[in-house]
Image (cartoon, helix red, strand yellow):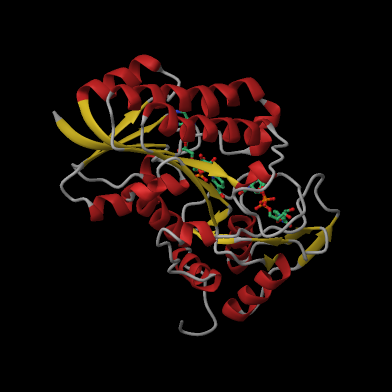
Amino acid sequence: MKEAILITGGAGFIGSHLVETLLNKYSEKNLIVLDDLSTGKLENIPKDKKVKFIKGSITDKNLLKNIFNDFKIEKVFHLAAVASVQRSVEEPEYTHQVNFDGTLYLLEESKKHKIEKFVFASSAAVYGDLEELPKRENMAIKPLTPYAVDKYASERYVLNSYNLYGLKTVALRFFNVFGERQDPSSPYSGVLSIFIDRIKRFQNGEDVKITIFGDGKQTRDFIYVKDVVKALILVSETDKSNGEVYNLGLGKENSLLDILKVLKNLIGELPPIEFTSPRKGDIRFSRADITKIKSVGFKPDYSLEDGLKRLLMYENIKLTSVV
Ligand code: NAD
Ligand code: UD1
C-alpha cells in the first residue's frame, strides 16, 4: 500500500501552498488532495505525479473510507472548510455539515487507521470580540458565528481525540493570513487581497478606490501564508504538540493605515481611499500571543513587509524601487 499524506482543502489558498512545500520537503511521499473545488481551484494544485487529486467532499463517508483503505495515510492536514464567515451566517446547516461533521468523519478514519498525526486549521474567530489583548490560548473564547462555533467544536474534538483515543492531534488558530492565490472576489475576502486587487486594477488604468470601513486604525495580526505552512509542518513533526492548540500570527499588530503607508512606500501612488462606516461586529484590535508556538520552535521567516513585497511581485505590480 502506498504511503501518503492527505491534505483536505489542498486546492484552496492556504492548502495549495502547503501542498507545494510538502512536495519539495517529502519528495518520496504521495500527497492526496481531497477537495470539492467549492472555492478551491484545480490550477492551484501543483502538477506532479506524486500529487493525486480527488474531487469530493469531506462529508462523503464512503469516499473517506475508500481513501483510507486505498492508501496508507500517515498524516492528515485538515484545511477543507467553508472558510467564509459570511456564508456560515447565511447557510449554517451546510456549514455545520462541512466544518463540523466533516472533521468528525476524518477523525474517525484517522483513529481507525492509527495515523501518525492529525493537524487542524482552526481560527482566531473563536475569540470573538473579547477585548483583552494579546490573545492567549487559555483565555476565554466567544465564538459569535456558525463558523466560529464549528471551528471551536471541531478543535475540541480534534484535541480530545488525543486524550481519549491516543490519536496524535494538534490545532492552530490562524489569525489573518495573506499571500498569493488568496481570492479577492468577495467583499468578505481578506482585506489585503482586496487592497492588492484594487492596486493592480488602478495600475491598469481602471477607475477604482480602496474602501476602508471605519477610521483605518483597526489592527490585525497579519501572517504571510508561507509562515503558516512552516508552522503547520513544524507542529506535525513534534510530539510536544500532541493534544495542543496554538495561536498562529506574527504576534504583531498593524492598522490598515500602517499597511497603506507601507504599500505607498513600495508602490508610489495608491488608488483614492474612501472611508465609510465601520462594519457591524468588526473587531477593533487583534493580536496573537505566540509564546506557545514559539516554545515548540516556530520562528517566522517573513515580516509583514517581506510578505507584501512577495505578493506585489507575484501580481506584477510595479514597485518604486528595486527590493
Ligand atoms: P479556501 O476557501 O481557499 O480553502 C478551503 C478549501 O476547502 C477550498 O479549496 C474548498 O474548495 C475546500 N472545501 C470546502 N468545502 C469542502 C468539502 N466539503 N470537501 C472538500 N473540500 C472542501 O480558504 P483558506 O483561506 O485557504 O482556508 C483554509 C483553512 O484555513 C480553512 O479551514 C479556514 O477556515 C482556515 N482559516 C483561514 C484563515 C485565513 O485568513 N485565510 C483564517 C483562519 C482560518
Ligand atoms: C477575520 C476573518 C473572519 C473572522 C474574523 C475573526 C478573513 C478574511 N476573515 O476577519 O473570517 O471572523 O477574522 O477574527 O480572514 N476592511 C476594509 N476594507 C475592505 C475589507 C476589509 O476596511 O475592503 C477592514 C474590515 O472592516 C476589518 C479589516 O479590514 O476591519 C480586516 O478585515 P478582513 O480581512 O475581512 O478580516 P477580519 O475582519 O479580521
Quadrant in the picture for residue 126: top right
Using the rendered image of the protein, determine whether residue 187 is visible from the camera's viewpoint: no
Query: Residue 24 at x, y = what percent?
Result: 24, 55
Observer-nearest of 31 and 39:
31
Does residue 178 lie above or below 266 as drawn? above
Q: Seen in the image, is 101 located left or right of residue 48?
A: right
| Quadrant of the drawing holding the N terminus | top left
Q: Seen in the image, is 45 located left or right of residue 195?
A: left
Identity of the residue furthest to the right in this view:
277
Query: Residue 105 at x, y = what percent?
Result: 42, 21
Query: Residue 131 at x, y = what percent?
Result: 77, 53
Does residue 99 lie above or below 217 as drawn? above
At 58% from the left and 30% from the top, the residue drawn is 153
Quadrant in the picture for residue 272: bottom right
At 66% from the left and 25% from the top, the residue drawn is 91
Q: How many marks?
A: 0
Identity of the residue furthest to the bottom in this view:
321
Identity of the residue furthest to the top in this view:
62
Does residue 263 lie above or below 295 as drawn? below
Observer-nearest of 169 and 129:
169
Query: Residue 177 at x, y = what percent?
Result: 54, 54
Observer-nearest of 150 and 12:
150
At 49% from the left and 67% from the top, the residue drawn is 307
At 51% from the left and 57% from the top, the residue drawn is 292
